[in-house]
Image (spheres, rainbow, N blue to C red):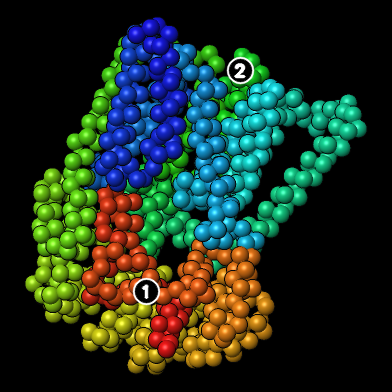
Amino acid sequence: MSTVLRSSLPRILLMVIVPYMMLLGGTLNVAVYPALQLLNVVLLGMAFAAWGLARIQGRWTWHITAVDTAVLVWIAVIAVVTLVNADEARRALIVVPYLMMLTVAWYVLHDALYNGVLTRGQVSDMALITGITFTFTALLEVSQPTLLPSGFFGLRRLAGLTGNPNLLSAILVPVIGLAAGRAWAARGRVRVVMGAFTVVALGVMVLTYSRGGWIAAAAVIGMLILLWLVDRGWTSPAKLAAAWKRARTWQRGLAAAVLAGIVLVGIAGLVVVMDSLDDPGRDTDLRTYLWEAAWQNFTEHPVFGSGAYSTPRMLLDRASTPPRTAQTHAHNYPLQVLSEFGILGGAAMALAMALLVRAGVQAWRGALTSRDRHLIAGGWAAVVGFGVHLLFDLAAWTPFVAMHGVIALIVMTASPTPTPRRRVVGRVQSIVVGVVIVGVLGGTLWMNPYATRNLEILSEAEATGEWLVAADAFEDLQAVDPRQPVYYWSPAMLWAMAAYRDQDPALARRAYDAFGEAAALGMESAASHANMAALAAQFGDLDAAAEHLDAVMRFAWMSVPMRLSVAERAEAWGLPEIARAAWASLLEDERVETYGLPLDRRVAASEGARTLAVLPLPDELTALQTLIDGDPAGALAELEAHPEWHTARAHALRAIAAKLAGIDPAPYMRAIERGDNSSDSVSWILLARDVVADKPLDGWVDIRDGARLDVRNEPASSMIATLHFFRPTFARMIVPQFAYDNRDLAIGALVDFLRERP
């Protein structure tokens, strides 16, 4: 191999594979799908092998980095906290390899940078390559008619390749900072191109409708302005005044216009953010209940926390999330650290932040050229914005997002004049880094066949219907990993469905025990208790059923559909006290006002519900009742009399009522595009499209169909299994015996009415 190729190969592989990891390899799918795991191992192995070969042949030297001390402190903190919280060690084993690989990426990229294989600009370009890809694929969504308007002013909420607007915003925040720094450092056409991309990326950020992203982007812009002033030497009012006097008239006018624009945009952004705080499905409860749960957990475990990656379990226990919103983090980095690692973790976090700030200041002051200083400024802006975003979300738990943050930190803190390590320390570091790489990649290879087998069993069960055979096949996986709860949950669901199909109490008992094992290992939730309640009722233990229904109420205090199912099942099983408590919790809860409980047939059919005061129907749901009563023209007239009802649901009801009344629904369908939409509006828009197009409503399947493994609109157990334990399982989460219906209550009533029409 030629000397030129040998010296270039590590750079080429790093410039290709690191962006690949930030585009695909670091996504959650890799943790779930075995084929992608193998691809990652191969590509990462190639990159690390090329790096290792280059450092051996080139006699590279390890150098000191900004957070070396903090890394050692964090290793000690994680070890102590894991020992104290030994019951959560299984979860620690999930997240620690991820943290180890991020740390390895930090050191490998620094090593390549300090030994001349990469430049600071090339490190920045790794994030920009992916940022440009994410930005322009997101822009393609603007013109896609199949996407639904769910942003503001009727605009589409962009998500791009991430599939999640919040993840896209988390990526764009550091990318905007790095792109601005690249434009500042460049000259000529490159500056124009990177400046234009920065503006486009800001536009895409606006269309993500991520309020945390907006605030973080504002922090990026603010930091860039501050560093520009420092770079110009305008660091005091007197110096600013002197510069103003020296400026020409057009320069003053331009500066005033830019300042006025920033103020106006800031005011407009603040108004939009404040106005959105009570949007359906986007109110402040989405964050505050997670923050409160994390803070409460910290106050109960103040010194050592509750263990690495214990937040998912804690949120299921304390925040009582409905099963379809199985959160994995507290949406706030400091609170997550305090909750999981206590004061020890908080101190380690503060130390790391202090070291990073010090290194960033030293890099800025020690920059050898103005170009390097401006790249560092971009890194500073990216890191500040990324840090602000971590106060509102924790998308960095996703590897491809975290890598953007790592690259921003390297651009900000890498020393222009690095200090070599002592040779003995460098040798130890080489051994440690090598062991970590081999251990993590080797462990992935060792577990890959079992992950493959898990996926094969699920697929065979769904395709063949041989549920009992598939359930028994999980015994081999349980023997390999006896503390993996998903390996108990999946056969439990299979036995439960067979028990429902065959009306077999013995199978119900077997499923009950397996769900209990899964719950004990970390999958306890409203769903596990609902399943165990239904199975206990099937094999005749009503006392156990009652206990589990009580637990469902405790876990799912925010879930209207779940509590409604509890009330219905309790009445059906002869548990009137629990039924009455469930009805009372629903009908006395001001948060359920907009759900339209009186429209649900279960409420009308329940003797217990009729003894309580039923909430009145809000806004456009009164017109829905008129429609269901058989008067579509009257419903449309009622809706037209209230132009202030301008949500997607209201426009969808207008379109459906017009269609049934023989009136052209097209104007109302167009109004949907301009309505105030949220993610909760999607089902209404889809239903209106189907009705207006005279499509059969077979796609709106009966949730109670016990013969389906994958049911549309049912909460996916993969939300817990995949996000908590990185193992897929069936989309069905609630056993058919529980008769759980997760549809919007008003949509459910309307679909039932439309199906029964002659």
Q: Which residue is painted at 34% across and 8% down in the image?
A: 1
Say which amino acid is labelled 1.
Asp
What residue would you read off at disc 1? 698
Residue 328 visible from this viewpoint: yes
Q: Position of residue 686 (x, y in %)?
A: 48, 68
Q: Which residue is painted at 64% across and 31% down in the image?
A: 194
Mark 1 nearby-residue class (10 Å; few <14, some 14–19, many ≥20): few
- Left or right, 232 with respect to 609, comes to right
For marks 1 and 2 on the same chain, the one whose residue lies earlier in the sequence: 2
Mark 2 nearby-residue class (10 Å; few <14, some 14–19, many ≥20): some
**As drawn, 318 above or below 309:** below
Mark 1 vs 2: CB contact within 8 A? no
Q: Which mark is residue 367?
A: 2
Q: Nearer the viewer, residue 302 or 46?
A: 46
Q: Nearer the viewer, residue 675 or 245?
A: 675
| Image quadrant where residue 396 sits | top left
